[in-house]
Image (cartoon, rainbow, N blue to C red):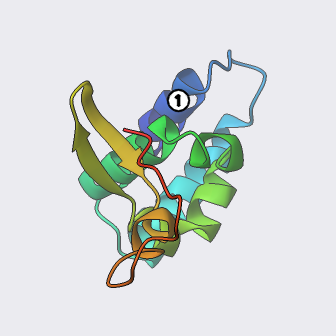
């Protein structure tokens, strides 16, 4: 289960076998699951959202970074657009929440 998650992660990042340490990555995945008490299905959802986010996909390049940033990653939200669902980091969502948008601010969607 942990090994499969590590292999899926590497595959999503376009890495081939030998370019990443399977045993070490599997161990970090195990720690997130067992020590940090995060279910595998939740981990997959968070990983998929993080990997599809333009910022986080460049930051989360290993399970170690995935674990390090877990609290922030699990807060990634999605918003609906005409073209589908776009992942949005929590920081981006809360900048203007409950406040007026700056003069000249234009929605990009």
Q: Is residue 40 visible?
A: no
Residue in front for this viewpoint, 103 or 4: 103
Residue in front for this viewpoint, 70 or 103: 103
Asked if 26 appears above or below 75 in the picture, the reply is: above
Query: Residue at point 47% right, 29% down?
Result: 8
Q: Is residue 27 visible?
A: yes
Q: x, y (%) of residue 41?
A: 25, 51
User: Residue pushed farthest bottom?
Assistant: 98
Residue in front for this viewpoint, 33 or 100: 100
Q: x, y (%) of residue 73?
A: 47, 62
Give the quadrant of the N terminus: top left
For label 1, the crowd category at 10 Å Cα-Cα, with few meaning under 14, some 14 to 19 and many 20 or more, is many
Asked if 95 appears above or below 2 in the picture, the reply is: below
Query: Residue at point 54% right, 22% down?
Result: 11
Count of labels in the image: 1
Query: Residue at point 53% right, 58% down?
Result: 104
Query: Which residue does the numbered mark 1 point to in the structure image?
Result: 7
Give the quadrant of the C terminus: top left
Q: Is residue 35 left or right of residue 21?
A: left
Q: Is residue 57 left or right of residue 72?
A: right
Query: Residue at point 50% right, 42% down?
Result: 53
């Amino acid at each position: 289960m942990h090994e499969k998650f590590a292999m899926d992660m590497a595959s999503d990042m376009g890495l081939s076998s030998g370019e990443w340490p399977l045993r070490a990555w599997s161990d970090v995945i195990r720690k997130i699951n067992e020590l940090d008490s995060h279910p595998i299905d939740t981990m997959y959802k968070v990983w998929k959202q993080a990997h599809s986010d333009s910022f986080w996909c460049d930051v989360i390049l290993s399970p170690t970074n995935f674990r390090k940033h877990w609290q922030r990653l699990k807060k990634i939200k999605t918003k609906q657009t005409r073209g589908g669902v776009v992942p949005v980091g929590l920081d981006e969502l809360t900048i203007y929440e409950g406040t007026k948008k700056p003069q000249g601010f234009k929605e990009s969607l």
